[in-house]
Image (cartoon, rainbow, N blue to C red):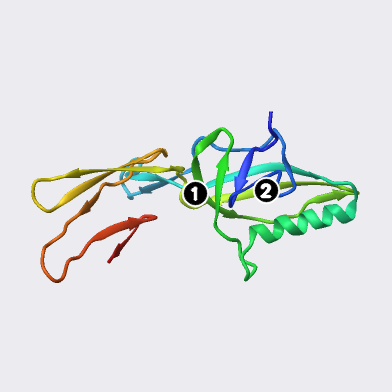
Amino acid sequence: MSNEMIWLGGKSNIELGFEVRGTSRRPGLPDTVDRTLNIPGRNGSYNFGADIGARTFAYDCAMITKDYMALQQSVMGLAAHLVDSYGKPRKLELRQRERPNQAFSVQLTGAFDPDRIMGLGMFSLSLIAHDPFAYGREEISETTITTSPHLENVFSGGNVRTAPLIILTNQGTNVIRKFRIANEYQIE
């Protein structure tokens, strides 16, 4: 069995120089954000519904190296991978071994501060997905309607619905086509 448990930004935990221990926390669902209003003179509260909050992952990890110098190099390498060129936590794609066809968009939250003993570094790697849902590769199929508009159904391998993409075209000198890239719409 492989020791690769997670991939961050396209690199496995082994490539990044650490092992993921079995005591990591990967929530089934994050906390809800409940929207209620208490009204004086009315029992209970008025419920406006709830949303899913950000999802936090906490991986208990270990860096096992031959000495403290090699440990320092591993710590510096992982730290460089977690931040951008301005020193701010960067967005990384998180894939997990148990969910191979799905990915979360995460960034570091909290500190990265390993406890060091000679060549051993123990730490908790906390990552937050502000969008709490995993997304899979999208398969796009096209259905042509008899007139010029057509509909592209998007089937996501993730765990949330993906809205269909409707493309309308006209004939003439100003033909406009819309296409979707990473949930943002662009006009060409």
Q: Residue furthest left?
A: 147
Say what amino acid the circle numbered 2 marks. Answer: Leu
Badge nearest the viewer, 1 or 2: 2
Residue at left offset 71%, top offset 43%: 14
Count of number-bearing discs: 2
* Residue drawn at point x = 59 percent, y = 50 percent: 10
Read off the residue under disc 1: 54
Closer-to-camera residue (61/140): 140
Is residue 138 positioned above or below 22 on the image? below
Q: Where is residue 159 in the image (x, y as percent from the top left)?
A: 41, 38
Q: In x, y percent, where is residue 81? A: 66, 58
What residue is rendered at 55% in x and 57% in y?
A: 91
**Is 156 rendered above or below residue 76?**
above
Taking the image as shown, residue 130 lies to the left or right of residue 8, namely left
Within-10-Å neighbours for mark 2: few <14, some 14–19, many 20+: many
Identify the residue position indicated by label 2 in the image: 125
Which of the 4 quarters of the picture holds residue 69?
Answer: bottom right
Tell me the amino acid under the disc marked 1: Ala
Residue 176 percent location from the top left of the image: 20, 65
Residue 93: x percent and y percent? 54, 50
Q: In this view, does 113 lie to the left or right of 29?
A: right
User: Which numbered disc, 1 or 2, marks the residue that appears first in the sequence?
Assistant: 1
Q: In which quarter of the image is residue 21?
A: top right
